[in-house]
Amino acid sequence: MFEAGIFLGAFLLFHLQPLIAKHILPWYGSSPAVWTTCMLFFQTLLVGGYAYAHGLTRRAKPARQTGIHMMLLAAAIVMFCIQWQRWGAPMLPGAAWKIFPPDEPRRYLLLMLLVGVGLPYFVLATTNPLLQKWFTRARPGVSPYKLYVLSNLGSLTGLLAYPVVVERTMTLRSQAFMVAALFLVYAAICIACALRARSAQAVIACVESDPVPAASATAGQKILWLLLSFCGSVLLLAVTNHLCEEVAVVPLLWVVPLALYLTSFMIGFSSLRIYSRPVFASLFMVSSFCACIALLASLLIHLPAQIIIYSVLLLSACTFCHGELARLKPAPEQLTGFYLLISIGGATGGIFVGLIAPVIFRGFWEFHAGVMLCWVLLLVVLLRDRKSALHAGSRVATAAFIICGTCAFAWLLAPVMIPGARAIAGKFAALFFYSAAGIVGLLLLWLISRRSESSPFSAQNRRWSHAAFALSFAAVEMTLIFHISSYGEHALFASRNFFGLLRVSEFPFASDTNRPVRALINGNILHGVQFKKAEDARKPTAYYVEDSGFGLALLNHPRRAAPEGLRIGVVGLGAGTIAAYCRSNDMVRFYEINPAVADLSRGANPYFTFLRDAPGKIQIALGDGRLQLERDLASGGSENFDVLALDAFSSDAIPVHLLTHEAFELYLRHLRTPDGIIAINAANRFIDLLPVVRAHARRFGLDMIVVWSDSDDERALRCRWVLLTADHSLARREPFASRADKAKCKGNEVEWTDSFSNLLELLL
């Protein structure tokens, strides 16, 4: 009975997370911060649930515990009924919640999560500590920690079931009703467990089968509990952020890191002694070196290789953290307090990544901080372990780390204080990194084959261990700090907010100091360029030159010569380059979700002047493009765009909700018929979008024209535009007839809907 309750509660706890996040994701422009904020909310409620279980079992008698928890279960069920009546489905907020202040998305999102799933999630969060505590009362002498592994197995099952089975076979509404029905079953099991525990005899002191100390945990142990849990949480969210920023914000890329995180708990707390510090510590060190290479050469490494590197790093680091937590676990009598501190550490990590890091960091540097913290924790654990080769010489090792750390931070400040030091530091970084990488081999030998202190070679081993560990840590630390210090080089502006990373850099064009250009960089990808000289400032550049697919569509549109001009819609503002095509009788309406992007092109002294210099009518609608188009249709009818451009990608991430069947249905309602054109910037390093576009073209009876931008114009960047139109004569006219890539217009088709999208089959 207890096993079933813990498994089902954990299943629902982690099945509910991608369900609610996927429902609200399109409302926030598919920003990676949506999942980070959701995780912050879930981790905070988890702390609340653990604190409730800790207080309830310590202060209330068994009979009172049962009554209080039954009332809480009943309140959650009543809330499901109210939500069903008001929203049409439990836990899924209605359309009224789509409108939020653009400058306060995070606060509004947290409020919506609280109203939608706050109470049921809180109840589910109490499952693990509460039922384990009742288990010790009902079955004295049996270790409850084995149930923790079962809990993580249930969580992992709930996570993996979502993208593999549920997301592909059920609508969101059906998923919500399924979760509500399973919650009723869970509530019945919980009540049965509570009644069984209440009827049990007085608590008999449990004797753990594993060798754990029965004494109360020391302050040092409790601090380690917090730091180890904090580190694992930071790395989980940082790796997830990085993957979502580079690919897409979809449940698949939420589930994989979280599944690895849960697997690390199962390995660490397994009674089969699967966790081996030498193995996982060695794996972490090697993968952290590989991650450094991936950071420095992210544009050269294929996506599958990056996913493998970061996944191995996350699994090894989290397994080390959670394995050491299992080594430090207290007697069963203290398990609720132990779980409470673990949850506080995890929630603190969520707060750091979700709230603090966006304020204090200009980039996604919480990943760097998490890796360095994990190295420090590894040092602390080895210094505390009497069997470790570092233990006897802890002063030497500590001194070595202090020296390495000081040198690394001095290196960070040197480029600011000494002109020309950055170039020297960069050369030194490569030399130091690759030479120090060879030391890892010695470190691995030491980790895998530790000698006892009685060995005649133990003193020599310790000295090698100190040197290897210090140099290895310094190599990783200095490489990460160099990556941070090189971020934003030549930057005039850098910001980080809920919707991503932005930089504006100025540099000479083609090494010509007399032709400076300004570039807008979103994440790692260039999103707009403008020449500074007045004679070149109004020329379209990058992906929008006259010879690009978009330029051809605009300059050769049948209504180009009409006296009323063209009506152009653009989902994604960027640097506002498309406004360079705007004539006095034209109208361009931009849809931009990130207020920081809009601010770069507005005001008295904007960084980019395309909008200011355009003679026609320019409009900017702040908010997610799809939601704004829906509101425009509801309030004023069709915009009757002659050309509607889709270029709202953040870094290389794909906004899936802008490429679904329902989205294209909306776009067509805003197009002027029959000669309207949808222009899609389909250039992406990792995802081939053509199968998705082909499916929509076939479904809506549109012609598809694929145009590669291969111009010799110095202002151009190579890109691929896809044009969709109901005007079947367009593809036969020049210049489209000669420029179209007819081979790319045929092939497999993958149709995305709001209920289903699968990125795996599109990975390049």
Image: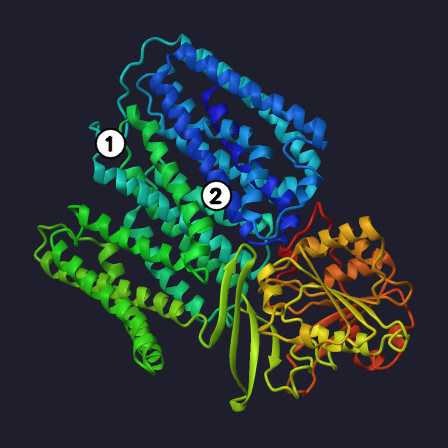
Q: Mark 2 — residue?
A: 40
Question: Which residue appears at 18% of the width and 61% of the height?
Answer: 466
Label 2's element?
Answer: helix
Nearest to the observer: residue 555 or residue 100: 100
Earlier along the polypeptide chain: callout 2 or callout 1?
Answer: 2
Nearest to the observer: residue 495 or residue 480: 495
Q: Picture coordinates of residue 676 (x, y %)? A: 86, 66
Question: Which residue appears at 61% of the width and 77% of the height?
Answer: 529
Dividing the picture into quadrants, the one containing residue 228 is top left
- What is the number of the mark on residue 212? 1
Q: Picture coordinates of residue 288 (x, y %)? A: 37, 60
Q: Does 245 sit above or below residue 387?
A: below
Q: How many marks?
A: 2
Question: Which residue appears at 83% of the width and 52% of the height?
Answer: 636
The answer, for residue 543, to whether it is visible in the render is no
Q: Amino acid at mark 2?
A: Leu
Q: CA distance from mark 2 to mark 1?
A: 32 Å
Q: Amino acid at mark 1?
A: Val
